[in-house]
């Protein structure tokens, strides 16, 4: 690990609310997007001459299209309830990382250009002309928000800073201030089919290699099919599952589950990515285009079911938005959605999370486990923010918390939850979500992980926990990178289906 | 009619129009702005009735705020419940005969004013004492609290210190409603009270007081969690889909 150029926060028993320290994170600037990817996405790539006018126009456009933004800009009473809820504030003490202050970066401009008091008495309501300094603040602090929605749980009006951040990034993109990381990923996923830019033949090779590994390891010929027409199930999973560690262990887990269930399933080259960074940038059209790959693949392959692998934001987009964006789901009455919905099997939820699928099979008794194989592990589970606060699993509200835990407890003997206020709907983000998972933001990522690390450290100390179980590709990548800064070993990080993979009996 | 009566009569019609038209405008604006994506903060209710319950808990109990910060909740809830009782008690100025609830609430309303003002002072204190809240406070946040405290205190002056002529006042207020204008009693506290209330009515639709209608339109709170079962699509998005 390289020596960090910043101070890594100390672990404490409780995450204390720091005294504000204005400007401490103002130096953090994520790398700007370059010409090629921005042009592909239809954005300028350098600050346009008419940036001020363009930004205000875009803001007006978004205010007219999104009720969330419109209401949230007006409704905040500056009560302060959200000020100590953001992991980035708790980890950095920079007051502009308080959710309300992050919103105010936009609200000051909104008030100036779109409200009467802001037009006649800007000083009274904190309204400001849009300046280059404000743009810089937007660029800095809208990339220090992981759009995790923790603030929206605690705001009395449910004001969701993620919506403001998304709008902020969309405005920045429109005037030529995009972020390299997201911009490149959105280009790769559309040009090649996945965020990692892994072409079809390479994917095929990787999967063949994995099949060999599994057979060597278990003696059972578990298959990982690709582009098999007429399969019953299409599995859409984050591309990190294909070759990042520990992600790939979960992919092996899904394959074993499908094998044990005797399911007919396939991956798709065209849809070899569940992730959808369109969400992070607040561009509906881009998010839709990226999501359409799944619909196209489903139609092309003729599948009856669509299952989504372990990924937080991907599951939010799949669960909450796919029906709207692409018709994957039920209840459509227009030709576009009917075309797909009549192909899908109505006995099952569409789309379905891999944890829902595995848990169903466990309840039916289809899967058999030797739980003792996980006995060297003492496990805790981190609720991923997008699953916890932006989606659901199962039938009842809150099943997104119980189902993954049920799966873990069905395959392993030692499980301990972290402190209740740090899990469930109040879960602390890993610190790397929402388009922040890039090396140029490492300081933000390390500091933002503090509240989660404190809670984790407590169960490590008290219960001997040595395994942090996850259901998100971003969480996995973030923790493997960040956990060593806090003195833990990166092998403590893994997936829920990695645990399933260890304990499942195959024949 | 005295010029004082004339001024206050005019002021109140103006304020009432601004308040009603302004809030109506906002409500229309909020309801016309589409919510293109399902974004309830989950766990969220899966039925419309569940959403109505969630909203009721937010409006009556400030449920999210309770989870969030007990001090703000205590002061905020004291203030709003106090305000609600005071306003109920005030309905008597506009009714003859009075409904039973309004009669019933009279004695409680008097003491609710203490609750209201104490809550306001608690909230105000936080704006000075808590560094995070100090950082986000703008002059308008302070002035809004000052305005409400001044309304409350001027009202309490009349209730507990120097009574005003309630019978004459009631003739004036009923006169406003029935367009049969009557003279306004001219005691200092009443004039101050009424002027500040008119100001409050005027700024309501252009200030953060929009949180009151706003909460009902907040997509994270008013949406049903059923996106896999129903397909919703905003008109502008549907138009783009057909292209
Ligand atoms: C549907 C009705 C309403 C609901 C649900 C509601 C809810 C809330 C909540 C949850 C807060 C934040 C906590 C607090 O600071 O108290 C708040 C703040 C506030 N409310 Fe309301 N409110 C409503 C109506 C009103 C009305 C009618 C007024 C004024 C005439 C008002 C004035 C205020 C003020 C001034 C604040 C900010 C207090 C501060 O500066 O900290 N509210 N409201
Ligand atoms: C046209 C509107 C209003 C009129 C005519 C009015 C009139 C009065 C009068 C005559 C009193 C004295 C009651 C008594 O002597 O027993 C009073 C008290 C009071 N008023 Fe108002 N008021 C109005 C609006 C408001 C508003 C909007 C608020 C709060 C934001 C408010 C807050 C109070 C309070 C706290 C008291 C003291 C407690 C009580 O007697 O209820 N008033 N008001
Ligand atoms: S969405 Fe998450 S990261 Fe963004 S301000 Fe809210 S709590 Fe912080
Ligand atoms: S909790 Fe909500 S209303 Fe209160 S300051 Fe934060 S965003 Fe504004």
Image (cartoon, coloured by chain):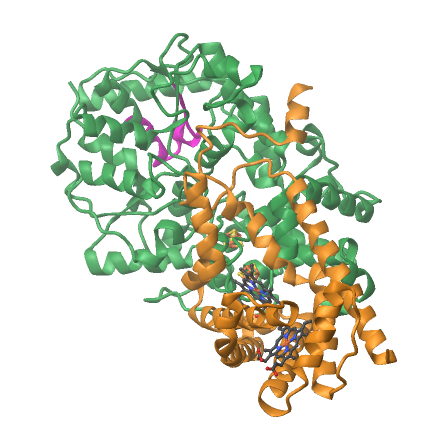
Residue A123 rendering spot, x and y as whole percentages: 76, 69
Residue A30 rendering spot, x and y as whole percentages: 61, 48
Q: Quadrant of the C terminus of chain A?
A: top left
Q: Is residue B175 magenta?
A: no
- Chain that is green in the image: A
Is residue A3 in view from this perspective? no
Is residue A420 in view from this perspective? yes
- State the residue at coordinates (48%, 48%): A148
Q: Is residue A238 magenta?
A: yes
Q: Is residue B125 above or below residue A54?
A: below
Residue B90 rendering spot, x and y as whole percentages: 60, 72
Residue extending furthest toward the front: B97
- State the residue at coordinates (47%, 26%): A273
Residue extending furthest toward the bottom: B161
Residue extending furthest toward the top: A230
- Taking the image in four quarters, ligand 4 sits in the one at bottom right
Image colour for chain B is orange
Left or right, A489 with respect to A178, comes to left
Q: Is residue B106 above or below residue A256?
A: below
The stretch in magenta equals A234-252
- Identify the image quadrant of residue B243: top right
Residue A38 rendering spot, x and y as whole percentages: 69, 34
């Amino acid at each position: 690990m390289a020596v960090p150029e910043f101070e890594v926060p100390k672990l404490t028993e409780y995450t204390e609310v720091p005294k504000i320290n204005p400007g401490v994170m103002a130096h953090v600037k994520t790398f700007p997007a370059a010409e090629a990817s921005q042009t592909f996405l239809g954005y300028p790539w350098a600050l346009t001459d008419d940036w001020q006018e363009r930004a205000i126009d875009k803001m007006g456009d978004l205010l007219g299209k999104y009720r969330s933004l419109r209401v949230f800009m007006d409704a905040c009473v500056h009560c302060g309830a959200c000020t100590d809820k953001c992991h980035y504030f708790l980890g950095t003490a920079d007051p502009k990382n308080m959710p309300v202050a992050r919103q105010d970066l936009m609200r000051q401009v909104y008030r100036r250009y779109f409200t009467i008091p802001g037009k006649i008495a800007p000083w009274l309501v904190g309204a400001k002309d849009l300046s280059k300094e404000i743009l810089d603040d937007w660029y800095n602090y809208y990339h220090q928000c992981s759009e995790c929605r923790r603030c929206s749980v605690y705001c009395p009006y449910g004001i969701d800073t993620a919506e403001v951040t998304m709008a902020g990034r969309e405005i920045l993109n429109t005037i030529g201030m995009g972020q390299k990381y997201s911009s490149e990923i959105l280009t790769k996923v559309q040009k090649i089919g996945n965020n990692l830019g892994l072409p079809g033949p390479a994917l095929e090779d990787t999967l063949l290699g994995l099949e060999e590994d599994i057979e060597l390891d278990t003696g059972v010929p578990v298959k990982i099919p690709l582009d098999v027409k007429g399969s019953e199930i299409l599995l859409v999973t984050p591309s990190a599952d294909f070759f990042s560690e520990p992600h790939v262990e979960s992919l092996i887990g899904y394959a074993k589950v499908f094998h044990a269930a005797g399911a007919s399933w396939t991956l798709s080259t065209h849809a070899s990515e569940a992730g959808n960074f369109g969400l992070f940038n607040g561009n509906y059209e881009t998010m839709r285009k990226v999501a359409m790959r799944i619909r196209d693949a489903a139609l092309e392959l003729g599948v009856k079911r669509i299952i989504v692998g372990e990924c937080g934001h991907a599951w939010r987009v799949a669960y909450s938005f796919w029906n709207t964006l692409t018709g994957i789901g039920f209840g459509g009455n227009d030709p576009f959605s009917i075309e797909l919905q009549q192909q899908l099997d109505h006995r099952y939820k569409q789309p379905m999370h891999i944890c829902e699928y595995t848990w169903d099979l466990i309840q039916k008794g289809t899967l058999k486990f030797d739980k003792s194989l996980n006995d060297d592990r003492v496990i805790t589970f981190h609720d991923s923010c997008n699953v916890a606060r932006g989606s659901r699993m199962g039938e009842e509200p809150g099943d997104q918390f119980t189902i993954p835990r049920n799966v873990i407890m069905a395959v392993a003997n030692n499980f301990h939850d972290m402190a209740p206020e740090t899990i469930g709907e109040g879960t602390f983000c890993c610190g790397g979500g929402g388009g922040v998972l890039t090396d140029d933001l490492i300081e933000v990522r390390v500091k933002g992980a503090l509240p989660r690390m404190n809670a984790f450290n407590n169960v490590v100390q008290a219960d001997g926990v040595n395994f942090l179980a996850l259901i998100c590709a971003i969480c996995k990548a973030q923790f493997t990178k960040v956990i060593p800064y806090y003195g833990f070993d990166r092998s403590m990080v893994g997936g829920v289906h990695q645990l399933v993979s260890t304990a499942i009996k195959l024949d | 009619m005295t010029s004082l009566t004339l001024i206050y009569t005019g002021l109140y019609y103006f304020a009432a129009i601004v308040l009603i038209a302004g809030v109506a405008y906002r409500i229309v604006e909020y309801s016309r702005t589409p919510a293109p994506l399902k974004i309830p903060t989950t766990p969220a209710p899966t039925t419309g009735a569940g959403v109505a319950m969630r909203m009721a808990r937010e409006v009556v109990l400030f449920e999210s705020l309770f989870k969030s910060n007990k001090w703000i909740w205590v002061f905020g809830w004291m203030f709003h419940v106090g305000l609600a009782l005071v306003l109920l008690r005030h309905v008597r100025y506009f009714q003859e005969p009075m409904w039973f609830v309004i009669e019933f609430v009279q004695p409680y309303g008097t003491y609710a004013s203490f609750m209201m003002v104490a809550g306001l002072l608690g909230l105000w204190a936080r704006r000075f004492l808590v560094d995070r809240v100090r950082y986000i406070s703008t002059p308008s946040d302070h002035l809004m609290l000052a305005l409400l405290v001044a309304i409350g205190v001027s009202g309490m002056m009349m209730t507990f210190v120097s009574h005003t002529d309630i019978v004459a006042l009631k003739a004036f207020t009923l006169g406003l409603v029935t367009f049969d204008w009557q003279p306004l009693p001219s005691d200092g506290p009443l004039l101050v009270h009424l002027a500040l209330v008119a100001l409050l009515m005027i700024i309501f639709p252009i200030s953060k007081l929009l949180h009151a209608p706003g909460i009902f339109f907040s997509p994270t709170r008013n949406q049903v969690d059923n996106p896999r079962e129903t397909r919703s699509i905003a008109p502008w998005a549907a138009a783009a889909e057909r292209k």
